[in-house]
Image (spheres, rainbow, N blue to C red):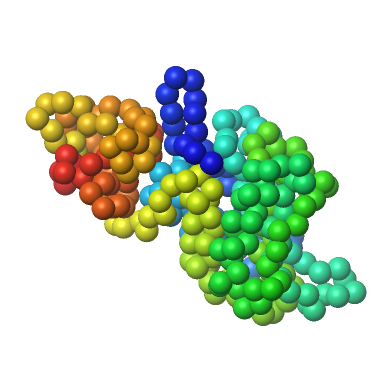
Amino acid sequence: MPIMQEGRGKRMPFLFLSPSTQYFNPYVTTGDERYWMNALADEMMPYLHASGITVTRNDPDGSAAQSIRDSNASRQDFHLALHSNAAPQALSGRLRGVDIYYYPTSEAGLRMANILVDNIKPIYPLPDRVQARSSTIIGELRRTRAPAVLTELGYHDNTEDANWLTGNLDAIARALALGVTEYFGLPFLIPGQLRDAVVRTDGDSLNLRALPSAEGPVLAQMPNGAPVRILAQYDAWYSVFYDGLYGFAESRYIAE
């Protein structure tokens, strides 16, 4: 999927990130589903921002219904829900695996689900149990305006899965964020130390672009002397935050 088109201009992608609000689902090890899925979302945020993606989070004290309403109330290009699974009582603690759910008629959802499956398989101990599944009953797939997937990242009632998830938050966050950048056609950037800087030109404005390329769509023009925050570097380009926008600018025109 290319950079989003909006009106006569273009903008970077908007992602609604919806970690579980289910505090009542305890892990067999420690903590609960809401705690660990929000911890995972926290780990994902720097990767997503460094790669030029604008992220909106749900309210961790809300509900799935509220997350759907909040997602639908704002302009979102994709809705990504983060969950972990639990087996039926008769099989409690005995199941393992990662399921990525999408709505069956959503081509975009299927595409994202397959990308995430490919990225999770190399880091999950049982790669043959990582799969994309369709569902017509999950609200965050059926009722969101934006295309959506819902991840079930292992079984939190299984000790091995719970330990894998809680012990590999950064690796899982990187795999998911990489999948999101692949879906949107953006480079995946590793965030560095955040640095404040300013635009330094001969007086002209500096273009903030949607891609690290001179052909990238222009998101905004940053005047000489404008403050920016450097998030990461990609060749001769910085990933920066400027005036509420994430994008890319030529590093030679930015001074720390």
Q: To which quarter of the image does residue 106 belong? A: top right
Most extreme residue toward the left is: 202
Q: Is residue 131 above or below residue 204?
A: below
- Residue at 22%, 31% (x, y): give it: 206
- Residue at 49%, 57% (x, y): give it: 178
Locate residue 90 relative to residue 206 in the image: left or right.
right
Image spot of residue 188 (x, y percent): 42, 54
Image spot of residue 21 (x, y percent): 68, 52
Which is more toward the observer, 114 or 29? 114
Any part of residue 56 in sight: no
Locate residue 137 relative to residue 126 in the image: left or right.
right
Most extreme residue toward the top is: 8
Q: To which quarter of the image does residue 58 belong? A: top right
Most extreme residue toward the front is: 215
Which is more toward the observer, 171 or 112? 112
Q: Is residue 114 above or below residue 108?
A: below
Q: Is residue 242 above or below residue 153?
A: above
- Residue at 72%, 49% (x, y): give it: 102
Image spot of residue 138 (x, y percent): 78, 48
Any part of residue 85 in sight: yes
Image spot of residue 35 (x, y percent): 61, 60
- Residue at 64%, 73% (x, y): give it: 127
Most extreme residue toward the right is: 90
